[in-house]
Amino acid sequence: MTLHRSTRRQFFGQAAVAAAPLIVSATALGLEDKPAPSKRINLGVIGTGNQGFNDMRAFLGDERVQIVAVCDVNRESPGYWNGAVAGREPGRRLVEERYAADKKSGKYKGCDALVDFRELLDRKDIDAVVICTPDHWHALPVILAAKAGKDIYCQKPLSLTIAEGRAMSDAVKKHKRVFQCGSQQRSDPNFRRACELVRNGRIGKLQTVRCGLPGGRPDFGKTGDRKKPEKVPEGFEYDLWLGPAPKAEYAPARCHVNFRWIYDYSGGQVTDWGGHHPDCAQWGMDTERTGPIEIRNAKGVFPADDLWNTATEYYFEAIYQNGVKLIISNKEKGGVTWQGSEGSVWANRGTHDANPKSILDSKIAEDGVHLYKSDNHYRNFIDCVLSRKETAAPVEVAHRSITICHLGNIAMRLGREKLKWDPEKEQIIDDNEAAKMLSRPYRDPWKLPEA
């Protein structure tokens, strides 16, 4: 595998630096030098549901990549975004139809569809993996992929618990893997520009940061009326889908896209969007490798429901050592607002603004703070697989960002007005009940692997 990987990266080494931030195929561009399959980065995709399809489409547009296998515990069914059909067989069809379009024959058969992710990780011909599973199925594949020598693109939020996030970051570092978290706002020029303005003092002394995230429990999968136990559908390995999570009877509203509203598998909107706006908030705050020292005034609304139990409304404050307050709530203006002694800057997807407007005209000097520049999150990952450089959204940064939201969920669920946090030791101080929630027990026979 070492020789296979080395040859491929030597082939692309210089080209990666100048790669265009486009995801259209080389064939569509009329290029004659599209790399042969033997010279591309072989990619395996674990999780072919909602985001899995989005990510596959993006990587299929990169001429340096060859998707050779997809993996999902579901063969094929509806229940995904807006009731859409997804699963490993639709995933395989997407890949093979895309590559068939580049063939004179119009035919292509070369993508395997697997049930167990461990079989995919055992493949010696796979260089990197894309992990788009539910949150409770992030830690195990990431750690095992790192141990297997695979580079990793893993969707946000990074982890289900703080303990998992620490183990994932340690494993990636130990095995020297390239890692990109799917927090794609790191590759949005509007967030980058806003963060640079803040980091270069254009709003004066930073005082308060406000993150506005969505609320509610939307019925994305159109299965919200099916929360009672039903027979497991044919072709769905439900026990494997549960994995390390507690044993539970199958219901359509439990799985696929609506898993986010169940605390056993996710943290609701708090962690779903917590992988985005709080991440960019820390980028602008220059705290992306540390964290707050306290969570305050945590308040959550948890309406009674037959199945869904995450917060629909929420508010909490993260207090930092320098006195800056980060507010995370579904009541705040969407996006991130950095407020300082001389003005404010706001960013959301595709736009940014400032008060006063003159801040937007500010020029950053050559010796000022210039943040990591990536204009395409997917191509940035492949660039770094080839160059072995750090990505736009590395694992430690992703871990530190989602830690804030995990702490907020803990405080809200326990009704804590205050929760003290040591960001260096990553420990909750003087609250044993809350400290126990830094991790969760795994259902046998699953265990969190050693790095």
Image (spheres, rainbow, N blue to C red):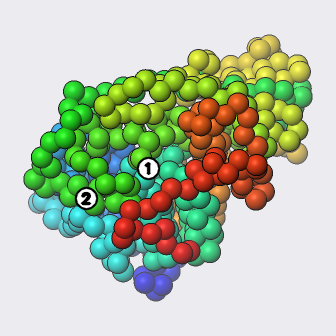
Residue at screen point 38% across, 55% down: 245
Judging by the rendered image, the residue that carries numbered circle 2 is 239
Residue at screen point 81% across, 39% down: 320
Residue at screen point 27% across, 67% down: 116
Screen quadrant of the C terminus: bottom right
**Which numbered circle lies on residue 191?**
none
Report x, y in % for residue 189: 62, 35
Q: Is residue 357 left or right of residue 188?
A: right
Q: Is residue 145 left or right of residue 187?
A: left
Determine the image quadrant of residue 240.
bottom left
Q: Are marks 1 and 2 in contact (CB under 8 Å)?
A: no
- Say what amino acid the circle numbered 1 marks: Asp
- Tell which residue pokes out farthest to the top in this image: 356
Report x, y in % for residue 420: 76, 43
Screen quadrant of the N terminus: bottom left
- Say what amino acid the circle numbered 2 marks: Asp
Judging by the rendered image, the residue that carries numbered circle 1 is 135
Query: Alpha-carbon neighbours of circle 1 within 10 Å: few (<14), some, or many (≥20)?
Result: many
The one nearer the camera, 348 or 363, is 348
Q: What SS does tag 1 mark?
A: helix
Residue at screen point 71% across, 55% down: 426
Is residue 95 in sight in this rendering?
A: no
The one nearer the camera, 284 or 369, is 284
Q: CA distance from mark 1 to mark 2?
A: 16 Å
Report x, y in % for residue 302: 47, 27
Query: Alpha-carbon neighbours of circle 2 within 10 Å: few (<14), some, or many (≥20)?
Result: some
